[in-house]
Image (cartoon, rainbow, N blue to C red):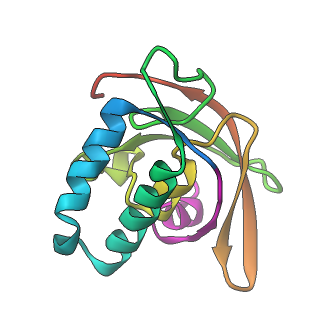
Amino acid sequence: MNIRILYFLQKGFFMNHKNIHITEKDRSRLGQLMLYCDFFTEQDQKILRKLNYDISHGRVVSEHEMPWNIVGIHSQVELQEIISGIKITITLVFPEEDDPKNNRISILTPIGMALIGSKIGDIIEYGEPHTVYNLIIQNTIRTFDRV
């Protein structure tokens, strides 16, 4: 795995605005996290507030109505950097399940926020102010139980 890509997946600057689909179960769980928002780091608070905003303007669906190609919590996501062709597969998880060494990335990371509600074929921009890279979502596998 490319260390630089993993770094940006955890810390990078992401630009992604969308109307998301989310399950009622995931929305409820994110609502619980909002109750404890003040205990998170400043960056996590910003991400959590942005997620809360996106969810409040998104579409809540049952697990069975969730489109198969939409990234949700506990989705395994295959990403490819467009120019280099480098691929990485991650699993999007809740903060307490975060394990970057095993490619389990928290929803409270910039990539987590960018991925939730995205779909196969979406392009996510990441990088630093003077260097922007593009990741395309190649595939996603939804799971509804904890991984």
**Residue located farthest toward the front when viewing the structure as drawn:** 57
- Front-most of 83 and 45? 45
Q: Is residue 124 left or right of residue 24?
A: right
31 lies left or right of 120 = left
- At 27% from the left edge and 53% from the top edge, which residue is drawn? 95
In the orientation shown, which residue stands out farthest toward the bottom? Answer: 130
Position in image of residue 124 (x %, y %)? 69, 55
Which is nearer the eye, 56 or 47?
Answer: 56
Is residue 129 rendered to the left or right of residue 4? right
**Residue nearest the viewer, comparing 66 with 103:** 66
Residue 118 location, quadrant: top right
Say which residue appears at 26% left-offset and 76% top-offset. 41
In the image, what residue occupies the spot 62% across and 48% down?
19
Rendering coords of residue 9 (x, y %): 52, 60
Outermost residue, right direction?
83
Q: Relative to residue 81, is residue 102 depicted above or below?
A: above
Q: Give the range drawn in magenta.
A: 2-18
Seen from this angle, which residue lies furthest top?
64
Q: Quadrant of residue 134?
A: bottom right
- Is 121 situated above or below 129? above
- Against 62, residue 9 (above or below) is below
Look at the image and say whether residue 17 sits in the magenta stretch.
yes
Is 70 in front, or is 22?
22
Q: Please tell me in which quadrant of the rendered image residue 2 appears.
A: bottom right
> Is residue 23 on the magenta stretch?
no
Number of numbered tags placed on the structure image: 0
Residue 132 spot, x, y in % from top left: 74, 72
Quadrant where the image shows the C terminus: top left
Query: In the displayed structure, would residue 94 be above or below residue 61?
Result: below
